[in-house]
Image (tube, helix red, strand yellow):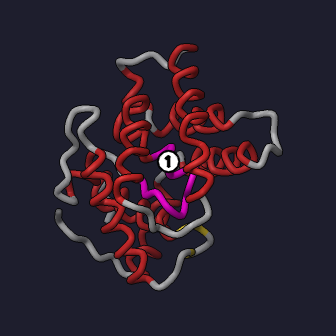
Amino acid sequence: MIEHWPSAEDLATARLIYEKNEPRNLFYRIAIELTNLAIEKKTSISVAEALASLLQTWNRPYYQYRKFDAQHFLEIESLIKRTFPILIKIRNKEIACPRQEIEVLFSDFEEVLGPVGASKCLHLLAPNFFPLWDRAIANRYGLSLQKKGENATLYAQFLYHTQKQSERTGSSQLHGRSILKAIDEYNFCKFTKGWL
C-alpha cells in the first residue's frame, strides 16, 4: 500500500478544481440526497433506484459491456434488502467497523456491481463510513484492482488508510461535505484526472 497524506489545504484546492472541471458532481448530489430520502422513506424512489441514478452516470464504463436491465436492477434490490440491516447500523457512524464485516459487505456489493460500483454504492449508503475509489485511484495507492470477487481485502486496506487521512484533517466535514468526499475529490483530481 502506498500512503498519501493530503493536507486540509490540498483538499480545499482540490475542491475548487473539482467544482470547476467535473460537471458530474450534480449527479452525486442528486444521488446522495435521493438515497437519504429513500432510506428515510420520504420519497417514492426506492433505495435501489437512488443508487441506480449514480451508477448510470458515474459508473458508465462498467455498463459498457454489461446490461443495466430489469434483471440487474432486481439483483441490486435483492442486495440492498439482504445487506440493509448492517448498513443502517453503520450508516451514521464514523469509519470504524470490524474488517471482516467490511470485507463481507464489499464482496456482496462487488459481486453485483464490480469493485468501483461497490465503493460508490456503499458510500451513498454510508457516506461517513465508506470511501470512494476508482481503478486509477486504487492503482496510485498500490492496490491494483483484481478480477471481480478478489478486491475486498484491498478495499479494506484503502478504507483504513482513508480513516487515517481523515483523522489527520481533524474534521468529519470540510467545506460542506463529508471528509471522505473531500478525500475522493482530491484523489480524483490528482490520480484519475491529473488536474493537481
- Identify which residue is drawn at 66% across, 45% down: 35
Instruction: Tell me: residue 183, above or below residue 71.
Output: below
Image quarter in which the C terminus is found: bottom left
Instruction: Tell me: residue 52, above or below residue 186.
Output: above
Q: Is residue 78 left or right of residue 59?
A: right
Image quarter in which the N terminus is found: bottom left
Q: Position of residue 128 (x, y in %)?
A: 54, 64
Where, by quadrant of the figure, is residue 49 drawn?
Answer: top right
Name the residue nearer the viewer: 88 or 168.
Answer: 88
Q: Which residue is mark 1?
A: 122
- Identify which residue is drawn at 42% across, 32% down: 113
- Identify which residue is drawn at 71% across, 46% down: 39
Where, by quadrant of the figure, is residue 104 drawn?
Answer: top left
Q: Position of residue 190 (x, y in %)?
A: 31, 62
Kind of residue indicated by mark 1: Leu
- Identify which residue is drawn at 23% across, 38% down: 150
Name the residue nearer the viewer: 18 or 11.
Answer: 11
Name the residue nearer the viewer: 169 or 83.
Answer: 83
Q: Which residues are magenta?
A: 120-132
Q: Position of residue 59 (x, y in %)?
A: 44, 36
Q: Is residue 138 left or right of residue 18?
A: left
Instruction: Tell me: residue 105, above or below residue 184.
Output: above
131 falls in the magenta region: yes
Q: Secondary structure at mark 1?
A: helix
Q: Position of residue 105 (x, y in %)?
A: 43, 45
Name the residue nearer the viewer: 171 or 185.
Answer: 171
Count residues near mark 1 (Cα–Cα under 10 Å), then give few for <14, some for 14-19, many for 20+.
many
50 falls in the magenta region: no
